[in-house]
Image (cartoon, helix red, strand yellow):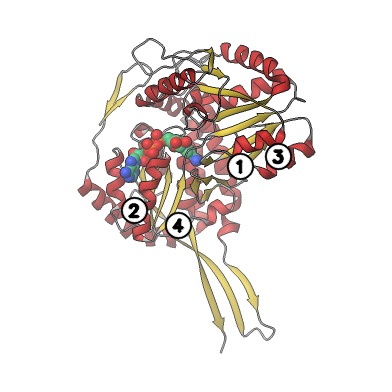
Amino acid sequence: MKIVNPWNGAILADVPADNARSVAAKYAKARAAQPRWSAVPVKKRLDAIVAFRALLASREDELAATLTQEVGKPIRQSRNELKGLAGRIDFFLAESARTLRDEKVFEDKGGRLEERISHEPLGVIANISAWNYPYFVGGNVFVPALVAGNAILYKPSEYATLTGLKIAEMLHASGVPGDVFIPLVGGGEIGAALLKQPIDGVFFTGSYPTGQKIAAAAGRKMIKVQLELGGKDPIYVCEDVDVQAAAAAVADGAFYNTGQSCCSVERIYVNRRIEKAFVDAFVAEVEGYRIGDPMDETTYIGAITRRPQIDVLRKQVADAKKKGAKVALGGKPLPGKGNRFEPTVLTGVNASMAVMRDESFGPIIGIEAVDNDADAVARMNDSEFGLTAGVYTTDAKRAKAILGKLEAGSVYWNCCDRVSPRLPWSGVKHSGIGLTLSTYGIQTFTRPKAWHLRGA
Ligand code: NAD
């Protein structure tokens, strides 16, 4: 399988891909190894994660360069991702032992009946991952899943294969046995082959259409399934904000990672009273973003990782223009060999336009004026997705009233495009089922076993 740099089209590597037979063989290895791994005390499993964290830090420059070259993420943002993963690991290191400990939930007065819960690993699980934040979305799964005693068949995205192989190499060097964490190389067909194996659970991050296929396959098997899917995340900017500051923060939320985050701001609603001032400030902010070689330290906008996405963006702009939107900035692919698109701001948009309905997953955003809070909430909830949603206002009471009405897994006041390891990460509607992160995101890799113990 050829690995191509999306910024300049250069071939980075040619790696041997898996096939249906090698997938079956890897599954068999993981199945045989899992009981030994789950017998290793949690403390020792955590030691391996401590060593993995140290390797991430000591190899940061090399790992960031690989990530940037294969997905086109600006180099500073690659480093941020590695540092961010270290923070998430710290949370798992602090919370896992306590979360996985057996619980005594009842003891009768005479001490003859005891009821306990133990947290058993699921067994052999599939981790099918996305390319946009391979360390984050992978780490949300493989770190707690390993600590909980599972063996993992890890299918990184075909667009982040080199990073996936480095993750495997570092975990192995850290003490996770080679047959407990096994990477699979290839595209969707290898993910599909993996789902044919008698696995015990599948943890998927990716698009809604692929998520539907994963859910169908898991449904037939009746195994645990978690899907972290796309979003069309809205932000509402109230009339009481500092316009410059809100415009800068929301623009960063929309354009960071070149707009290719699951929780990128994808729709902006602004109170009509400040529409012009906000649009002016927003456009000025985005005009200042430096587009360039992602390896350059000063670059903020890098490559579109998947070439077909250029067409999606082009079509969204054309559709919006046809229906009356104005292009305030950008609007077309950039010249050059690789996959590049101008940072694009559309105004006068509405819900009939694809740019306000379908995930854009690129450096493009629509801004729509609204009359009041009720109008904003109705429009924000008018989506098939529900990953994140937020509001910018100086009024805490008003913010909380709005957040309470939003149909989303995560809600934000005066922030956006933010993930915390302490809070559950989940979506509603077509943004997914299940969750990662928080202590719930440790327990999710286990099954609670009920112990009824009656003494003699
Ligand atoms: P994708 O759905 O194209 O691919 C995801 C993974 O699924 C890849 O590893 C791919 O090889 C594999 N795959 C494809 N077809 C398959 C099949 N039939 N069976 C099994 N596996 C298959 O998504 P992507 O382009 O890698 O990622 C972008 C999407 O992921 C966006 O929609 C984004 O919003 C979403 N995402 C969500 C989160 C979240 O936390 N909710 C995080 C990151 C990305």
Nearer to us: label 1 or label 3: 3
Which residue bears the numbered disc 4? 149
Crowdedness near tag 3: few (<14), some (14–19) or many (≥20) residues, C-alpha within 10 Å: some
Amino acid type assigned to the residue bearing label 1 in the image? Ser
x 56%, y 47%: residue: 437
Q: Earlier in the sequence, mark 2 or mark 3?
A: 2
Tags 4 and 2 in contact by the CB under 8 Å rule? no
Return the x and y of residue 63 as percentages of the image width and height: 43, 29
Query: Residue 402: which numbered mark, if any?
Result: 3
Quarter occupied by the N terminus: top left
Query: Residue 217: which numbered mark, if any?
Result: 2
Amino acid type assigned to the residue bearing label 4 in the image? Gly
x 57%, y 54%: residue: 440
| Element class at badge 3 | helix
Is the residue 295 above or below the residue 418 in the image?
above
Please state if 373 lies on the left or on the right of 308 as rendered: right
Query: Residue 223: which numbered mark, if any?
Result: none
Crowdedness near tag 1: few (<14), some (14–19) or many (≥20) residues, C-alpha within 10 Å: many
Residues at marks 4 and 3, CA–CA distance in whole angstroms: 41 Å
Direction left: furthest residue: 21
Q: Earlier in the sequence, mark 4 or mark 2?
A: 4
